[in-house]
Structures are given as C-alpha cells and as structure tokens.
Image (tube, rainbow, N blue to C red):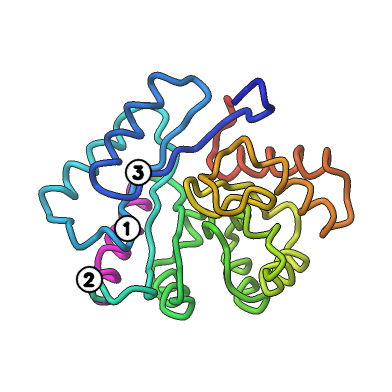
Amino acid sequence: MREQGVGVIVNVSAAYDSCEKVVDMVQKYPFMYAAVGIHPDEVGSLTEERFARMEELFQRDKVVAVGEIGLDYYWKEPEREIQKKWFVRQLKLAKECGLPVVIHSRDAARDTAEIMREQKAEETGGVIHCYSYTREMAETFLDMGFYFGIGGALTFQNARKLKEAVAYLPLEKIVLETDCPYLAPAPNRGRRNSSLYLPYVVTALAELKGVSEETVRKTTWENAVKLYRMDEA
C-alpha cells in the first residue's frame, strides 16, 4: 500500500466477528487503524453479552472510530426497530468513548438524520460512509459537521445524483473511501475493490471540483487525519 501512495488505512468492521479481527490487524500493520462497530445488516446477531465484549475492544490501541453503524432499509431484515435500537446504542457508545462514528445509511436518510439529531451526533462527529443521497440531504449532514466518504461510485457514468452532491460539498469535508470488496471504480467496476484503486477516485474528484489531483490528495489526507484524530499518523 505505501509503495502505491496509500499512507494510512482505517479498517472498518461490520459483523461481530470482524470487530476483533480489525483490532488484531492494526497491531500487525503499522499503517492501519481500526473502527469497531456492527453494520445494520448484522445487528440481528447482537446480544447484550456480545455488545459488552465489543465495548471492551475500545480499550485496545489504534481504535479510532465506532463503525460501521447506522440504518439499512434496502433489505427487510433485520427489522427497522432492531436496527434503530442498536444504532442508538452505538451512537451513545461513541459519545462515551469520545470517538467519531462511521455511519452507513441506505434508503433510510430521514430516520438516520432524525436519530443523529436526537442523539446529538454532532458532538462526536464522524463520516457519512459511502455517501449516496442528494445534495439537499448532504446539507443536513453538513450542518451537523460531518465528513462525507467518497469512493468508486463517483466514477460511474450513472452517478448523477452523487456528482451533484459532491460538486456542492466543500473539499475540506470529503475523505476517500474504498468500501472493499464493493464499488470498485471504473475501469475496474465489477472486480473486487482495493485501496490501490483510489487514484481513479482522486482523478474523478479533481475533475469535478476543478482542482489538481495533488490538491485532492493533500486535502483529503488532512481531512482524514482530523476526522479520525490521527495527529500522529
């Protein structure tokens, strides 16, 4: 990764089993940091005992965020009330730990924003991971001070809504994301994604914002350091 210009990776957990894995991996790879959380698609497997075990992982080194957490209404399961319950619990956990959040929101913009407001998510801050909503919705999250994760989808020809939102957003609020194994950028669409494909996202972002690729690289790096509070990175 370093040889290809990728300085730091925040490795984000999703299922319960992956929480411990990402925390172990950061001990092995100096350029890697961890986010610990349960994706909304996976919260059906959560129990109080498992949640307590997950909480313990925040005492380990190099855990910089709570995530990937949120709401996903694309699928019918888990039930929405279950998703909301664990979203709220994990937002409260982030506040207790003093960490930013990595938020997943799919087909659930209104409920996501409502819960974030109720829980005062702006006090912890974080990133709307893999942003996919409209420019208007972007204003709502921007008002809360959140960053926006932008990845391979920006290179897709049919990504008009996303491009409109990104054109509106200040570059100082954008961070680069991979979302491996999904959303590989063109011309690698359909393949397993990799952080080594980030230069394609940089190019697309630079063209859209009318700035140099170096400006995109420098600014998004600085944004990520601020977002994840990795001043030592």
State the image quarter where residue 65 is shown. top left
Residue depicted at 39% across the width and 74% down the height: 74
- Rendered-image quadrant of the N terminus: top right
Give the labeled residue for mark 2: 82
Q: Earlier in the sequence, mark 3 or mark 2?
A: 3
Of labels 3 and 1, the one closer to you: 3
Q: Is residue 228 left or right of residue 160?
A: left
Give the labeled residue for mark 3: 36
Within 10 angstroms of label 1, few (less than 14), some, or many (20 or more) residues?
A: some
Residue bounds of the magenta highlight: 80-96
Cα–Cα span, label 3 and label 2 = 19 Å
Kindly identify the amino acid type of the residue bearing the numbered disc 2: Ile
Q: Are discs 3 and 2 less than 8 Å apart at CB? A: no
Q: Earlier in the sequence, mark 3 or mark 1?
A: 3
Residue depicted at 76% across the width and 37% down the height: 218
Helix, strand or loop under label 2: helix
Q: How many marks?
A: 3
